[in-house]
Amino acid sequence: MERPILYTIEPPENFKQLLTLYESLGWNSLKLTVNDLKQMCNQSWYAIYAFDEQQLVGMGRVISDGVVTGIVCGVCVLPNYQSKGIGKEMLNRIIEHCEQNRVIPQLMCVESLKSYYETFGFEKFTIGMTKNINR
C-alpha cells in the first residue's frame, strides 16, 4: 500500500529538494540556485508542495496581484511520482485557492499539454510571448 501524499502550503525546510526536482525535469537551464528557488517560492502569491513523508515530490505556484489575475506556473512532479494524480491534486488546490479569492487563474503551457489543462476548464485565449534576456 502506497503512503499518502501530504499537500501543504508550508515550504520545504531545505529548498535543495526543489532544485533536485527542477533538475530531474530538465527545468534548470537558467542555473537557478537553492536561494533563487527559495526566493521564487516565498515571493509567490500562493505555493503548494507535495511530500512523500519528508521528500518533496511536487510543487506548483501562482504569481498574482491577488485581485484580478493569477498566473499558474512551475507545476511539477518528480518523474517517479508522475501519473499518480499528484499534479492533478495540486492544480485542483491552486484553482480552488484562486476561486476562493476571486482571482482568475491563467497559465501558459506547451501545445502538448493543452488537452490536459482543458480537463480542468482552462481554455485557449491568446498568444503567449516571451522576451529572452541575458542573465
Image: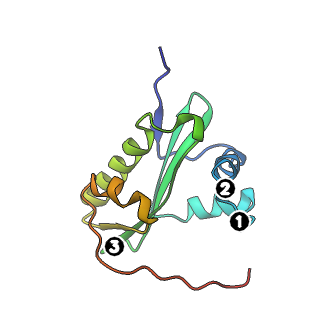
* Residue designated by label 3: 69
**Helix, strand or loop under label 2:** loop
Quarter holding residue 55: top right
For the residues labelled 1 and 3, the Cα–Cα distance comes to 27 Å
The kind of residue on which mark 1 rests is: Ser
What residue sits 39% from the left and 74% below the top? Answer: 65
The image position of residue 42, as x and y in percent, is 57, 60
Depth order, front residue of 14/52: 52
Which mark is in front, 3 or 2? Answer: 2
The kind of residue on which mark 2 rests is: Gly
Tell how many labels: 3
**Helix, strand or loop under label 1:** loop
Which mark is in front, 1 or 3? Answer: 1
Q: Residues within 10 Å of mark 1 (few under 14, many from 20)?
A: few
The kind of residue on which mark 3 rests is: Thr
Depth order, front residue of 102/126: 126
| Marking on residue 107 | none
> CB atoms at circles 2 and 1 under 8 Å apart?
yes
Horizontal side of residue 60 vs 126, given as left or right: right
* Residue designated by label 2: 26
The image position of residue 115, as x and y in percent, is 32, 56
Question: Which quadrant is home to the C terminus?
Answer: bottom right
